[in-house]
Amino acid sequence: MTATLAPPLRIGKAAVAALGALAVATGALESVVTPTLPLLQRELDMSPAEGALLSIVLLITGALVTPIAGKLGDRHGGKRVLIRLMAVVSAGGLVSSLAPNLPVLLLGQVLQGAMVGALPLSFILVRKLLPAGESKVAIGVVSGLFVAGGMAGTLAAGPVAEGLSRHWMFALPTIAVIGGTLLVNRLFPQDPPGRPDGTRIDWPGLLLLSGTLVTLMLVLALAPDIAAQPLVLGALLLVLAGFVTGWAAVERRAASPMVDLRMLARPAMWKACVLTFVTCVGTSLAVYLVPQLFAVPADAYGFGAGATEIGLFLLPGAVAAALAGPVSGIGARRLGSRAVVTAGIVLMAVALVALAAVHTEIWHLVIGKVMISLASGLCVTALVTGTAASVDQGDTGIATSLVLVTRVVGYAVGAQLGGALLTAGTPAGSDVPAESAFVTGFVIAGAVTALSLLVSRTMSKGVEE
């Protein structure tokens, strides 16, 4: 007797729309801190260094969660893991919306960081439940809606925070996340889990990398006060060295490491990591410094912009970042990855140095931020795609995860460096950093970015298609 095979599971347009709505909501929730960071610093009495920490903690959590979420989704089913992940995100959004102080808000942002793992889980779902051609369209739609949600959050966060309160700018997108999660849970069938004997998750490596990143952020946050508490900083440096040493030892011996450090010996990999780190340091310095400069009082040297105005000023940069991915892909196909990366580095270095020299008008900052966002998108996209193409197919996940970790470290170091510069450059008894602190930040970022040309020149040109 011939066994009857169960028909393959399929989803309709309503389910894809629900997934798109969830992407919009998570994109909005992710983006509300950047335009309102000066407002949060005032209301919660944060130093610039503490503000920088707040701006990156979600990204750090996301980088740690994403590879784990993808493996769990492959093993246990994308829907099951996605729903649980979004429950954590919703809890984080509620904690952020109710936070009375910085430690509680940081906890909320740590929990919200789980949202970064939602995109790969969404891709797992649509690839399992849609035909190949339709799944590619659905992946593009969901990715685009996540970017659109980020733009909406950038625009709406300021008016909501100023018109209602900072609590509502977290609460409203969190309510949307909860609604989108309920729709996805209702409209998506349970996708079949993968093989239970799949690749093991590197939990020791994850824990040690988490400790490394957290300790690094604390070191950078405390650096401006080194004279006041040198013993604390020295102890943290020893702890950091211990975490790095332990993590490197675990990753070298793990059967399935979270980050395969042996791949760094390959010239294509270490060059990609160096360039990714430098590009992200320059980008994150600008991402942190530009809103702070907008918020400096007009009777000093700034523009006295509120959260609503800052969101409007940052929107062109968000649009440029969204366009950079497709532009980079086209450029890499026609000219090769090296040409795209080099063009991006030159554009970013010029923009950063120009901001250091000229930042007396709002349009100076808006144009500079657009150039930096476009340059960063060009570089990172070309580096990720070039890295994926330079390794064996079975090593793609390991290679791209290494670039991802480097990207997060670069963003974190850049933002914390910006916060440390502004904290150190704030005169005693004043809330306004000296203008020279901003100039120093832009100059450092521009100089480091320009030096990376020495590495980009040695890259292979890349395959032209």
Image (cartoon, rainbow, N blue to C red):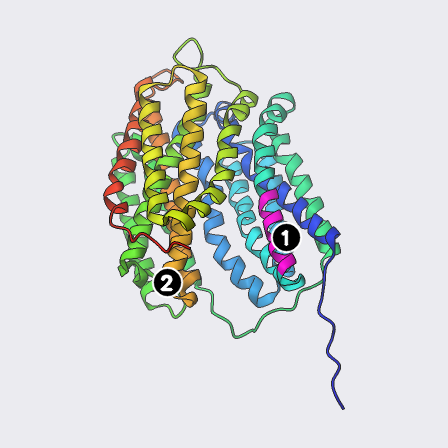
* Secondary structure type for disc 1: helix
N-terminal of the two: label 1 or label 2?
Answer: 1
Q: Which amino acid does the dot numbered 1 rest on?
A: Ala
State the CA–CA distance, disc 1 to disc 2: 27 Å
Q: Which amino acid does the dot numbered 2 rest on?
A: Val
Label 2 near label 1: C-beta < 8 Å?
no
Mark 1, residue position = 138
* The N terminus, quarter of image: bottom right
- Residue 41 drawn at (x, y percent): 47, 26
Q: Quadrant of residue 348?
A: top left
Highlighted range, magenta = 133-145
Residue shown at the point (41%, 42%) measured from the top left: 378
- Residue 4 drawn at (x, y percent): 75, 81
- Residue 128 drawn at (x, y percent): 63, 64
Based on the picture, tell me whether residue 136 belongs to the magenta stretch: yes
Mark 2, residue position = 391
Majority secondary structure of magenta residues:
helix
* Secondary structure type for disc 2: loop
Residue shown at the point (24%, 38%) measured from the top left: 451
Q: Is residue 95 visible?
A: no
Residue 356 - label? none
Q: Quadrant of residue 12?
A: bottom right
| Depth order, front residue of 434/129 | 129
